[in-house]
Amino acid sequence: MTNYPNLKFIKVTKAAQQKSHLVFKIVKAYEEDAAAGYLYFIILEAAVDGEHGRLYRAKILLPHGIPKKILLDFTPLLRDSKPGLGGLVAGAAKDIPDAATNVEVIELARFAVDEHNKQEDEHLVFKEVVRASEQVVAGFLYRIILKAAKNGDISHFYEAQVLLPAAIDAKVFLEFKPLLDKKRKLELGANPGQPEDVPDASTNDEIIDLARFAVDQENKKEYYPAGRNSRS
C-alpha cells in the first residue's frame, strides 16, 4: 500500500464562506493533464452515541501528487445485507487483508466519518473497519485560467483546478485562487504563454462547464465532489 505522509484535508472557516459572491465571465486558458491516484472502498462500522453500530460503505479518492483526501460517497448498508465492497470500476482492485488493523485504512475510515458528519450535520462515531480494497484509477486534471467578478465589480483572473477521475461520475474541486492582473503572462505547466494563446479557451463547452463548476464550488466552499450526473 502506498503511504501518503502529507495528506491533509483543508478546513474552511466561516469567514471564508461569507466572502463576496463570484460571477463567472470567461475562460482565458486551460491545460489538461493525465492524472492518477488510488480509490479506496471501505466497509466500516459507526454509530450515533448510545445506539448500536451500523455498517457504512465509504468511497475515498487519493489523487497522486495532490495532498488531499476526497470523500466521493458514504452510504449506509442494510442491516441484513452482506458487507460487499461492490461498485468497483474496471481495473485491478485488490483487497487489503489487514484492513481492520491497518493504520492508513483506519485513518481513511475516520476521515470518511468526519467528512460525512460535516456534510450531513450528523454525529456518527467511528467504531472499526470491517473490510477494504484499493484500486489504481486514472483521470484528467484540468487547470483553468478564468475571469470572474464579485458583485458587479471589475473582473479579475483566477486559477482553478478540477479533477475528473475516469469511470467515476463526479467532478472534484481541488483549488481556486486569485491571480494578480500584472501576472497575466501565465504558465500552465509545459505550455507557457498568455491566456489568449489557447485558441478554443473561451468556446470549449466542456471547459466552460468545468470553469462554472469551479466558481460555484468556490462560492459554496465545498471541497468535495459534486453529486452524480454532475458531468453532464
Image: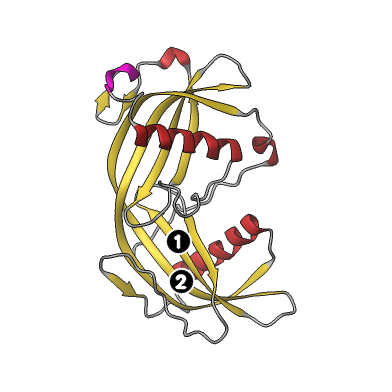
Give the image quarter of residue 188: top left
Q: Is residue 166 above or below residue 110?
A: above
Decide which of 228, 45 is in the foreground and name it: 228
Please state which amino acid type lies under the numbered disc 2: Ile
Using the rendered image of the protein, determine whether residue 155 is visible from the camera's viewpoint: yes
The magenta segment: 195-199
Dominant SS in magenta: helix
Q: Looking at the image, do the residues carrying marks 2 and 1 touch, with CB atoms under 8 Å apart?
A: yes
Q: Nearer the viewer, residue 77 or 191?
A: 77
Q: Position of residue 115 (x, y in %)?
A: 58, 58
Residue type for callout 1: Ile
Residue drawn at x 38%, y 69% is: 87
Q: Name which residue lies at 65% across and 71% down.
A: 125
Q: Is residue 35 left or right of residue 169?
A: left
Residue at 50% over, 49% down = 226
Q: Residue beneath label 2, please?
A: 42
Which x, y percent locates residue 5?
A: 43, 56
Residue count near mark 1 (Cα–Cα under 10 Å), binned few <14, some 14–19, many ≥20 = many
The reply, left or right, for residue 213 in relation to residue 140 is right
- Say which element carries label 1: strand
Asked if 161 appears above or below 53 in the picture, the reply is above
Q: Earlier in the sequence, mark 2 or mark 1?
A: 2
